[in-house]
């Protein structure tokens, strides 16, 4: 239960839609839906930046290629980070919910990061 409190404090917008979940299954379903929304936002932001930088050229040392490399590295880091952070709960019944909450938190932070670059060309 500690991870939910941490996430609620760290990202209030994340926890708000799922506050009414009364069961583990409802919490999992809610977090999964929120993760899907965040993934869509992430893909939209990434595509906007890719399109912007693609127009500037695709040489090996271009923002286009560095963004692609950074996104691949971020995905690896997110997944590895969540594997590490949720390791102690992996055998518990709430693991899916805890892991999904972790993915959601990382993804929302990445969306904010990419959106900053969209707003500040």
Image (cartoon, grey):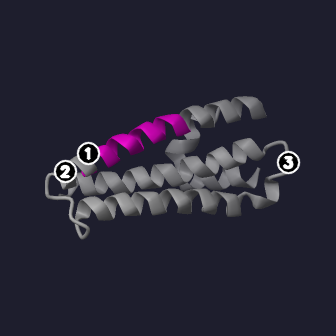
- The answer to if 14 sits in the magenta stretch is no
Q: Are marks 3 and 2 in contact (CB under 8 Å)?
A: no
Q: Which mark is residue 105?
A: none
Q: Which mark is residue 48?
A: 1
| Neighbourhood count class around disc 3 (C-alpha, 10 Å): few under 14, some 14–19, many 20 upward | few
Judged by depth in the image, the label closer to the viewer, 1 or 3, is 1
- In this view, the residue in front, 6 or 42, is 42
Real-space Cα separation, disc 1 to disc 3, in angstroms: 39 Å
In percent of the image, x 35 and y 58: which residue is there?
68
Q: Earlier in the sequence, mark 1 or mark 3?
A: 1
Q: In this view, does 16 lie above or below 60?
A: above
The x and y percentages for residue 31 are 61, 37
Q: In this view, does 115 lie above or below 30?
A: below
Residue 22: tell me if it is visible: no
The region drawn magenta spans 35-49
Q: Do the residues labelled 2 and 1 touch (CB within 8 Å)?
A: yes
Secondary structure found at label 2: helix
Q: Which of marks 3 and 2 is nearer the N terminus?
A: 2
**Which residue lies most toward the bottom here?**
61
| Neighbourhood count class around disc 2 (C-alpha, 10 Å): few under 14, some 14–19, many 20 upward | some
Real-space Cα separation, disc 2 to disc 1, in angstroms: 6 Å
- Can you say which quadrant of the picture contains the C terminus? bottom left
Circle 3 sits on which residue? 92
Corner quadrant of residue 79: bottom right
In percent of the image, x 53 and y 47: which residue is there?
12
Judged by depth in the image, the label closer to the viewer, 3 or 2, is 2
| Neighbourhood count class around disc 1 (C-alpha, 10 Å): few under 14, some 14–19, many 20 upward | some
Secondary structure found at label 3: loop
Secondary structure mainly formed by the magenta segment: helix
- Describe residue 66's horizontal placement relative to residue 39 as left or right: left
In percent of the image, x 41 and y 57: which residue is there?
71
Q: Which mark is residue 52?
A: 2
């Amino acid at each position: 239960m500690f991870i939910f409190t941490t996430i609620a404090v760290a990202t209030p917008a994340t926890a708000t839609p799922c506050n009414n979940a009364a069961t583990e299954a409802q919490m999992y379903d809610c977090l999964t839906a929120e993760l899907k929304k965040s993934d869509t936002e992430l893909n939209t932001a990434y595509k906007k930046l890719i399109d912007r930088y693609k127009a500037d050229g695709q040489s090996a040392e271009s923002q286009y290629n560095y963004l692609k490399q950074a996104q691949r590295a971020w995905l690896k880091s997110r997944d590895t980070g969540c594997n590490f952070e949720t390791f102690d709960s992996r055998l518990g019944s709430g693991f899916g919910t805890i892991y999904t909450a972790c993915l959601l938190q990382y993804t929302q932070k990445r969306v904010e990061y990419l959106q900053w670059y969209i707003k500040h060309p």
